[in-house]
Amino acid sequence: MKKTSIALSFSILILLSACTDSGIRGDLDQVLNDTFEAEEEYRKVQDDLEKREKAEQELFADIMALTQEEQDKVAEQAQEALDSADERLAFLKIEKESMQLAEEKLAEMDQVIEDAEDESVKSDVQALKAKMQERFTAHADFVVAYEKLVGHQKELYEMLKDEESKLQTLQEQATEVNEQNNVVQQAVTKFNDLTKQVNELKDNTLEKLTDS
């Protein structure tokens, strides 16, 4: 059976320290930092989630190396994989809630846009907000894809526990896992790309405000 790759890599949104300047620059800095701080729980669970993914991947490889005569051990390790999948979903829930909180903080930027008198500044901040919203939407899409992936993986682990499962059925389920994993990786790439775009746009916007 083809081994699936489930490790994810996320870029972290790096923001500047809070600025004490008054005016639009200071207000925008505050909103950005509020958003960044709201993502703290998301950042905290990344290491734990990655460790579970790697350990589960190794466990899956071990299961595939066992013979039919070792079904008891297969069932035991498949249950371990199921427990690990549930732990990943718990970490994902924390991550999801953290990002949702950060998205709510983004609404604070509407006041910054409203207060901006310079149309160029207003346009820049609106573009930044739109790109940040696009990033949050991409993360929400990732969550949906990842939950579906874990669902397919859990179905596969359940099949492995059942000694009556046919090899063809296992192979078909593994194919579904691999196909959904590709969807997840595409979602990760899109999220990382948008994170880079947000950082670039944020830096350019703050630089303009500093020079103005």
Image (cartoon, rainbow, N blue to C red):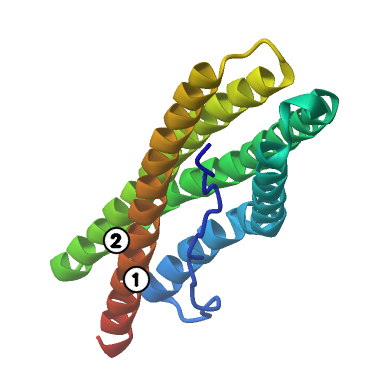
Q: Residue furthest left?
A: 119
Q: Look at the numbered disc 1 and give the secondary structure of its residue.
A: helix
Residue corresponding to mark 2 = 128
| Contact, mark 2 vs mark 1 (Cβ under 8 Å) | yes
Q: How many marks?
A: 2
Q: Residues within 10 Å of mark 2 (few under 14, many from 20)?
A: many
Residue 116, by quadrant, is bottom left
Q: Look at the numbered disc 2 and give the secondary structure of its residue.
A: helix
Query: What amino acid is labelled 1 in the image?
Result: Lys
Quadrant in which the C terminus appears: bottom left
Find the distance from the CA under tag 2 to the CA under tag 1.
6 Å
What label sits on residue 124 in the rendered view? none
Residue corresponding to mark 1 = 202
Image-based side of 90 in relation to 126, left or right: right
Q: Position of residue 102 (x, y in %)?
A: 52, 49
Residue at (42% x, 34% y) in the render? 180
Q: Position of residue 66 (x, y in %)?
A: 73, 37
Answer with mark 2 or mark 1, whichever residue precedes in sequence.
2
Q: Residue furthest top?
A: 164
Residue 160, by quadrant, is top right
Compared with residue 7, is residue 62 higher up or lower down, i.e. above or below? above
